[in-house]
Image: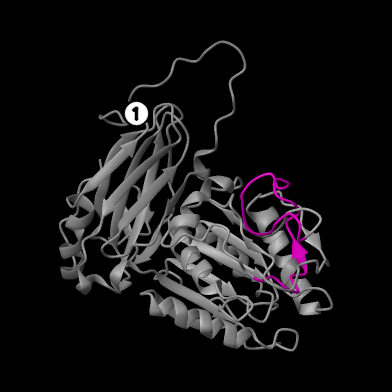
């Protein structure tokens, strides 16, 4: 039914073999070759669960970085067929009876695949290191079909722009706070210092001021280093979309005690993490109980990959001050990994000031990127100082960890 189109733009024609022929590994939950109307499960007696509406099917991806692995997952329901298509960024076109947000040079990167008893189709594509592709845009979209109900649904296209960070680095968007800094006057200098440290180890860092940019398709991760500045009205949607389609997100907050702006930022993080991502976290507010010296550290119970890549940071000292919020004691939260903690003996209990959340820890919606949240209003929160000598190493590991 989905025959390949003959018209190709010259650039896209050169890129299409990447999706079709270059090291394509398809991981499918019991993929059955065939056509729509393939095998279905025999219903068992009794009450059957209500299936997820086909219209809730969605795509998650990471960023398309040359020399890296492009991962795409179609999340849908069991017993449906899935096709995955890609094109240049020149929509729209007609495919069969549908007007689709793809260009006429669309190409199948996954022919019909059957979910069987599973709920997803996963693709992994190794992208060669071709500098000429950097900045070139592509769209990916998926068609899902239930032969039992005869429903069809297009997930909607996702824009990707091929990016590059030489030497295995990451393409990073770092948000620097330069306005309303009365309660955190060190915010601009701290962001600059972190950007320089990350650039020095091979990351490509784009620093933007105050507001999350509209166009995020080139980035592997977002480091939101606004200490007290709350986001504008549509940033929650764009942060969520970024976690689903491009990469990981870091959110910083503090101080909040005695800081109106900091309290607004704290409220944003609480609302977004719980209402949008469904993390179900209980935050401790208005408590500056950190030691103010190097009494805090990287938790030994942090996510193992974070602790070791690219450096070993387990137990490394890290200064927290004027945090204005906590995650409570270790083990208190229903999900996630402790990241920055006050060890026993410094506070009444091992208090958690920073947490890490892998994609599987986020229950409300499927995402590809990881999430890190840190409460720290210190004037050396992001860069090394005499009291915080290891800060740069802790954030170097974070940059690698956020981009799975």
Residue 17 placement, left or right of 136:
left
Of the pair 316 and 212, the residue shown nearer to us: 316
Name the residue furthest top: 45
Tally of numbered tags = 1
User: Residue at the location (47% across, 69% down)?
Assistant: 396
Q: Residue 188: percent from the left, percent from the top? A: 60, 87
Q: Which residue is mark 1?
A: 30
User: Residue at the location (58% across, 72% down)?
Assistant: 224
User: Residue at the location (43% across, 26% down)?
Assistant: 117
Say whether residue 338 is magenta: yes
Q: Residue 195: percent from the left, percent from the top? A: 48, 80
Magenta region, residue range? 319-346
The quadrant of the image that shows the C terminus is bottom left
Name the residue furthest front: 345
Q: Where on the picture, by quarter, is residue 233?
A: bottom right
Q: Where on the picture, by quarter, is residue 218?
A: bottom left
Q: Where on the picture, by quarter, is residue 5?
A: bottom left
Which secondary structure class fits the magenta region best?
loop
Residue 36 placement, left or right of 352:
left
Of the pair 388 and 65, the residue shown nearer to us: 388
The quadrant of the image that shows the N terminus is top left
Question: Does any portion of residue 149 appear in the rendered image?
Answer: yes
User: Residue at the location (62% across, 17% down)?
Assistant: 47
Residue 227 placement, left or right of 39:
right
């Amino acid at each position: 039914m989905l025959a390949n189109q003959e018209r190709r733009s010259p650039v896209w024609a050169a890129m299409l073999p990447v999706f079709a022929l270059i090291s394509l590994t398809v991981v499918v939950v019991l993929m059955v070759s065939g056509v729509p109307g393939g095998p279905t499960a025999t219903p068992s007696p009794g009450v059957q669960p209500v299936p997820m509406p086909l219209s809730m099917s969605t795509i998650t991806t990471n960023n398309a970085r040359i020399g890296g692995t492009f991962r795409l997952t179609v999340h849908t329901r069991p017993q449906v067929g899935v096709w995955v298509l890609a094109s240049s960024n020149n929509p729209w076109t007609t495919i069969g009876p549908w007007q689709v947000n793809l260009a006429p040079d669309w190409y199948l990167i996954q022919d019909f695949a059957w979910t069987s008893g599973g709920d997803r189709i996963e693709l992994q594509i190794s992208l060669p290191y071709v500098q000429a592709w950097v900045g070139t845009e592509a769209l990916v979209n998926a068609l899902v079909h239930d032969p039992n109900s005869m429903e069809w649904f297009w997930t909607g296209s996702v824009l990707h722009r091929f990016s590059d960070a030489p030497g295995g680095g990451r393409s990073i968007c770092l948000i620097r706070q330069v306005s309303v800094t009365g309660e955190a006057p060190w915010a601009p200098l701290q962001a600059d210092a972190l950007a320089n440290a990350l650039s020095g180890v091979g990351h490509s860092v784009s620093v933007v001021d105050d507001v999350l940019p509209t166009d995020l398709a080139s980035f592997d991760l977002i480091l939101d280093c606004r200490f007290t500045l709350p986001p504008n009205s549509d940033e929650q949607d764009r942060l969520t979309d970024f976690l689903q389609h491009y990469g990981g997100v870091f959110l910083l907050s503090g101080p909040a005690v005695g800081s109106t702006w900091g309290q607004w930022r704290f409220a944003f993080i609480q609302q977004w993490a719980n209402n949008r991502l469904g993390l179900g976290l209980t935050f401790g507010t208005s408590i500056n109980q950190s030691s103010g010296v190097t009494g805090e550290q990287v938790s030994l119970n942090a996510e193992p990959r974070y602790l070791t890549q690219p450096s070993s940071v387990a137990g490394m000292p890290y200064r927290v001050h004027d945090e204005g919020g906590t995650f409570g004691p270790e083990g208190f939260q229903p999900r996630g990994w402790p990241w920055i903690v006050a060890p026993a003996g410094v506070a009444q209990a091992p208090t958690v000031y920073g947490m890490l959340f892998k994609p599987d820890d986020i229950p409300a919606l499927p995402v590809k990127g990881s999430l890190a949240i840190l409460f720290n209003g210190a004037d050396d929160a992001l860069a090394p100082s005499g009291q915080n000598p290891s800060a740069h190493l802790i954030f170097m590991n974070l940059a690698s960890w956020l981009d799975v």
